[in-house]
Amino acid sequence: MSLSCLAPAQPPASTLQLTSHDTANRIGSVLLTCEPTGGTHPKRDKACAVLSGAGGDFSRITARHQACTLIYAPVDVTAIGTWHGKPVSYSTTYPNRCEADRDSDGVFAF
């Protein structure tokens, strides 16, 4: 009989497709992977840290302290993919890009 050593199970990588669409018809889309960190998000290290702190739950992200103008220019955002193997499907509308960046602590800053 042969015994083999098994490596500890690695948690599945987290992969999210993030998109934004505003009233000026600007559309942004980035790929974010965490553990290991990668993708096309311009601040992927920060975005992964924010999401890790929220357990991958976008509704649990703590907004950072930052003043934004009261100009109403809605931005629709979505996040679709997986976080540690669990499906993620999130969408919301922020009043403007500044609030999208602030309230997501940079996750939707692209």
Image (cartoon, rainbow, N blue to C red):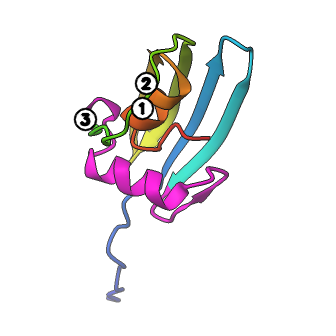
Q: CA distance from mark 2 to mark 1?
A: 6 Å
- The answer to whether residue 62 is above or below residue 48 is above
Q: Between disc 1 and disc 3, whose residue precedes? A: 3
Task: Please say if the residues under marks 2 and 1 sit with CB atoms less than 8 Å apart.
Answer: yes
Q: Quadrant of the N terminus?
A: bottom left
- The answer to whether residue 71 is above or below residue 81 is above
Q: Residues within 10 Å of mark 2 (few under 14, many from 20)?
A: some
Task: Please say if the residues under marks 2 and 3 sit with CB atoms less than 8 Å apart.
Answer: no
- The answer to whether residue 72 is above or below residue 39 is above
> Mark 2 or 1, which is nearer the eye?
2
Residue under pointer 1: 88
SS at mark 2 in the image: strand
Residue shown at 56% from the left, 48% from the top: 32
Which portion, as a residue range, is magenta? 34-60
In the image, is residue 46 part of the stretch drawn in magenta?
Answer: yes
Where does the image place residue 65, in percent across and percent down from the top left? 30, 41
26, 13: nearer the viewer: 26
Q: CA distance from mark 1 to mark 3?
A: 14 Å
In the image, is residue 40 part of the stretch drawn in magenta?
Answer: yes
Residue shown at 45% from the left, 16% from the top: 70
**Could you say which quadrant of the image residue 12 lies in?**
bottom left
- The answer to whether residue 7 is above or below residue 94 is below
Mark 1: amino acid: Val
